[in-house]
């Protein structure tokens, strides 16, 4: 591992100043992904700016009835927070579905959003990878892509985003607060992450030096029921093969509104807008849920080893929506 | 030295960057000089001669290196030593007090909760963290959405992923501190999923933790 300088500022302003716009400096949150990637040689920053004492680490109610979650809040604290459990049980479920108890105690909200893909080729520096080393190629297409993307991928990259929490945030329509050398701005989820296109090395829309400071959750929808569900290869401590986060509002047997996101199917938490459009005003029946899922997955371009993900995503989505509709 | 045109070491590995700090481990202060790249696991084992925490995978996937930082379980293999100089660290060597075993250690012995023992220090520290998290009312993925203590059904409810979510009225949590979560076998298995045991001593591990949790 390349030697690095270590700074631990106590305010966001100091963190931004220590970083500037240098691409040789990286922010360190819980380190559960970054330290591993440094050890593997995937990334090798010359300086780490530890933001765990600088980024806000509180969960506060906003004047509008939502919640503002500091980027430094640990995943374990987020899932256990009474205001999160009461108003956003789906978010708590998504966080608890991820990683292990130890890793959730370390991982921060900001770091969770910025974790890198677990594509085996990205993590293996002896292999080509357009995300790690632009222009070297993508062996995953002809190699092991069982867990990789079925939607929105490009010739240069078929990686998926590994976060469960981000899928819930996409379905909730969370706003990501960012500060950087160019000032502060807000990015609505799922807009933080970007499709690979021909620049798969860029996971997000953040500019060099920008720091996530908070995630703001809109007020819970009255009458909205939510659920996060994850299909994986073992019952616990495993990345999603497909996940679904959904908020459903049914009135008199008809879908009044819904917000749906799929996880582990794309380079981004995948907002299922085609399914949402198909569902609004439709009867809340399993048949319609299936039609909506098919509308969304019509755009799927699975690879030979991950065709099963299309059926899995369809079935998981229908099941989640049916459960939400029946529970009323 | 870096960037010095006269040096003959242009191709040599760049010099390590070291930091002097004090670590608080098991109620003792240790002054150490560490490379910024050094993990807490390597510092504990290599510099402080605290070899209880084990290096299994060194990628955060096996839990053998689990220690408590400010009372919370973490994997020391992904924790930079420089990042915890203002924290309080407890390793398996510091779990018991005054030469007496921690109740978890006693229970692990009573229930044969190990074979080779390599994962045991991590299992013990993780279990200590689980007890604290459950006592603080932290949920796990298998904890029902309705608050613990709402009734015998809720407290003993097994998690069926296909089951519909609970009634919204039952989902509301009371104000004030959350009630402790009762640790049955299902809760223990889910919460301990970050600790692997290649000998497969899981039944004994679960029984030992359940006994202490009672």
Image: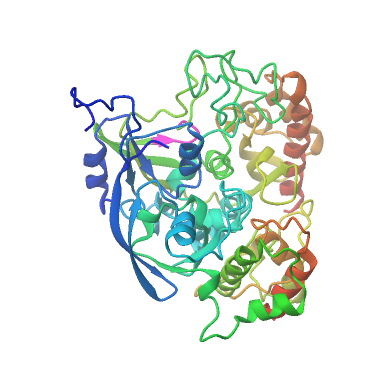
Q: Is residue B175 above or below residue A207?
A: below
Horizontal arrangement in the rendering, residue A67 relative to residue B153 (left or right): left
- What is the x, y in percent for residue B178? 55, 72
Horizontal arrangement in the rendering, residue A255 relative to residue A8 (left or right): right
- What type of secondary structure mainly makes up the magenta span? loop
Q: Which residues are magenta?
A: A187-191
Horizontal arrangement in the rendering, residue A261 relative to residue A145 (left or right): left
Nearer to the camera, A204 or A68 = A204
Query: Which residue is rendered at x = 72% and y = 58% of the image?
Result: B197
Nearer to the camera, B33 or B176 = B33
Q: Classify the position of the N terminus of chain A by image quarter.
A: top left
Q: Is residue A253 visible?
A: no
- What is the x, y in percent for residue A105? 51, 58
Q: How many marks?
A: 0
Colour scheme: rainbow
Query: Which residue is rendered at x = 61% and y = 54% of the image?
Result: A100
Q: Is residue A154 visible?
A: yes
Instruction: Indicate whether residue A171 is drawn in magenta.
Output: no
Q: Is residue B3 above or below residue B83?
A: above
Residue A73 position by quadrant: bottom left
Nearer to the camera, A209 or A319 = A209
Q: Is residue A210 above or below residue B29?
A: above
């Amino acid at each position: 591992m390349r030697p690095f300088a270590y700074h631990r500022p106590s305010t966001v302003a100091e963190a931004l100043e220590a970083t500037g716009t240098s691409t040789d400096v990286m922010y360190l949150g819980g380190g559960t992904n970054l330290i591993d990637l440094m050890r593997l040689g995937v990334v090798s920053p010359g300086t780490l700016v530890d933001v765990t004492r600088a980024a806000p680490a509180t969960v506060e109610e906003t004047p509008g009835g939502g919640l503002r979650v500091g980027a430094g809040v640990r995943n374990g604290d987020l899932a256990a927070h009474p205001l999160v459990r009461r108003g956003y049980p789906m978010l708590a479920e998504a966080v608890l579905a991820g990683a292990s108890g130890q890793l959730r105690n370390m991982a921060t909200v900001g770091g969770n959003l910025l974790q890198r893909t677990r594509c085996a080729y990205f993590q293996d520096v002896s292999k080509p990878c357009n995300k790690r080393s632009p222009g070297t190629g993508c062996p995953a297409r002809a190699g092991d892509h069982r867990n990789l993307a079925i939607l929105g991928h490009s010739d240069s990259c078929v990686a998926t985003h590994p976060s469960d929490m981000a899928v819930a945030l996409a379905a909730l329509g969370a706003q990501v607060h960012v500060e950087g050398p160019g000032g502060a701005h807000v990015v609505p989820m799922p807009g933080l992450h970007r499709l690979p296109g021909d620049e798969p090395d860029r996971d997000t829309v953040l500019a060099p030096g920008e720091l996530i400071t908070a995630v703001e959750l809109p007020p819970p929808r009255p009458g909205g029921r939510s659920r996060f569900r994850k299909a994986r290869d073992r019952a616990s401590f495993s990345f999603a093969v497909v996940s679904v986060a959904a908020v459903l509002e049914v009135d008199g047997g008809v879908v009044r509104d819904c917000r749906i996101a799929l996880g582990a199917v794309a380079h981004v938490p995948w907002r299922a807008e085609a399914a949402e459009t198909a569902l609004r005003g439709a009867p809340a029946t399993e048949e319609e849920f299936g039609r909506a899922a098919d509308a969304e997955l019509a755009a799927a371009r699975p690879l030979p080893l991950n065709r099963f993900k299309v059926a899995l995503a369809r079935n998981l989505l229908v099941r989640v929506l049916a459960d939400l509709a029946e529970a009323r | 030295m870096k960037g010095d045109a006269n040096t003959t070491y242009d191709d040599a590995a760049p010099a390590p960057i070291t930091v002097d700090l004090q670590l608080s481990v098991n109620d003792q202060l240790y002054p150490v000089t560490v490379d910024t790249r050094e993990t807490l696991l390597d510092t504990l084992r290599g510099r402080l001669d605290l070899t209880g925490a084990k290096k299994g995978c060194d990628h955060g996937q096996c839990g053998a290196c689990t220690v408590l930082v400010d009372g919370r379980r973490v994997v020391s293999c992904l924790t930079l030593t420089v990042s915890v100089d203002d924290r309080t660290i407890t390793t398996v060597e510091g779990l018991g007090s005054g030469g007496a075993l921690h109740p978890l250690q006693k229970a692990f012995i009573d229930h044969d909760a190990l074979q080779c023992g390599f994962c045991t220090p991590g299992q013990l520290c993780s279990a200590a963290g689980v007890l604290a998290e459950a006592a603080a009312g932290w949920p796990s993925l298998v904890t029902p959405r309705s608050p613990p203590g709402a009734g015998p059904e809720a407290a003993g409810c097994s998690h069926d992923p296909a089951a519909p979510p609970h009634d919204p009225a039952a989902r509301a949590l009371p104000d004030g501190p959350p009630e402790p979560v009762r640790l049955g076998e299902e809760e223990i298995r889910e919460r301990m999923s970050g600790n692997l045991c290649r000998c497969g001593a899981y039944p004994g591990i679960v029984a030992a933790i359940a006994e202490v949790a009672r």
